[in-house]
Amino acid sequence: MVHSATGPRTPEGKAVSSQNALRHGLHTAPDNNLVFSWFNVILNNERDAYEELNTDDLRREAALMLAVAEVRYHRVLHHRGTRDVEQSSMLQFAHKLRKEIHDTLGAMPKTLKDGLADPIELEYVSIANQKLEEVLNELGRERRLQDRYLGEARAQRKRALKVWRNLSDRENTNSRNEPNYNQ
């Protein structure tokens, strides 16, 4: 019988799990400066304009929702694009470890005529191989998490765009639901 994971059950496990989304910084609150920059672009304001949110105005509320969605979406894209090229990234570590394993194995005797392999080097290769497998598994988990965050950001962006379009379409039509060209 196969059991599916149900998540943490203890308060300590739940406390750790609740912080997983913050580990990569992808679910932190968006930077206000970026949100307001997007907000002003969406509202077609001038570059340095700063417009406060008026909760009584559905258009501005929809613009803010879209601005937050854009910031989150672009943060995930940026994270995906830069994470693996950082010198301290797990992917870079995996490449170095793989090269060390390859170089160590390449320096070992190829046949019994050439002599016996150094047992310390064999042990190193075995341990390094296990570590490489762990790192690759962690990279896979991280990639799946990034994919999930990207999917969530895309869905939030799509919903926000739909709301924005609906409001914009409503504003740009007359009582007969025809486009209003006199604006």
Image (cartoon, helix red, strand yellow):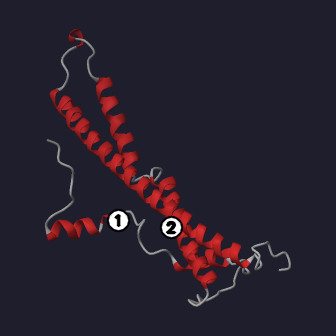
Query: Counting residues from the N terminus, which is met first, the one under dot 2 or under dot 1?
Result: 1
Crowd tier of the residue under label 2, counting other residues whose Cα lies within 10 Å: few below 14, some 14–19, many 20 or above: many
Question: In this image, 35 relative to 131: left or right?
Answer: right
Q: For the residue labelled by badge 2, is the local secondary structure a helix, a strand or a loop?
A: helix
* Mark number displayed over residue 37: none
- Residue kind at label 1, given as amino acid type: Ala
Is 100 above or below relative to 26? Answer: above
Depth check: 178 or 2 in front? 178
Is 130 above or below relative to 48? Answer: above
Where does the image place residue 76, in percent across and percent down from the top left? 49, 60
The residue that appears at 33% across and 39% down in the rendered structure is 97
Where does the image place residue 79, in percent across and percent down from the top left? 48, 59
Given contact means CB atoms under 8 Å apart, are the residues at marks 2 and 1 in contact? no
Task: Estimate the spatial distance between the alpha carbons at disc 2 and disc 1, rounded to whole Å.
Answer: 13 Å
- Residue kind at label 2, given as amino acid type: Arg
* Mark number displayed over residue 21: 1
Depth check: 55 or 75 in front? 55
The residue singled out by tag 2 in the image is 72
Where does the image place residue 67, in percent across and percent down from the top left? 58, 73
The residue that appears at 15% across and 71% down in the rendered structure is 11
> Which residue extends farthest front?
176
Question: In this image, 94 relative to 117: left or right?
Answer: right
Depth check: 141 or 173 in front? 173
The residue that appears at 41% across and 56% down in the rendered structure is 148
Crowd tier of the residue under label 1, counting other residues whose Cα lies within 10 Å: few below 14, some 14–19, many 20 or above: few
The C terminus, quarter of image: bottom right
Depth check: 85 or 60 in front? 60
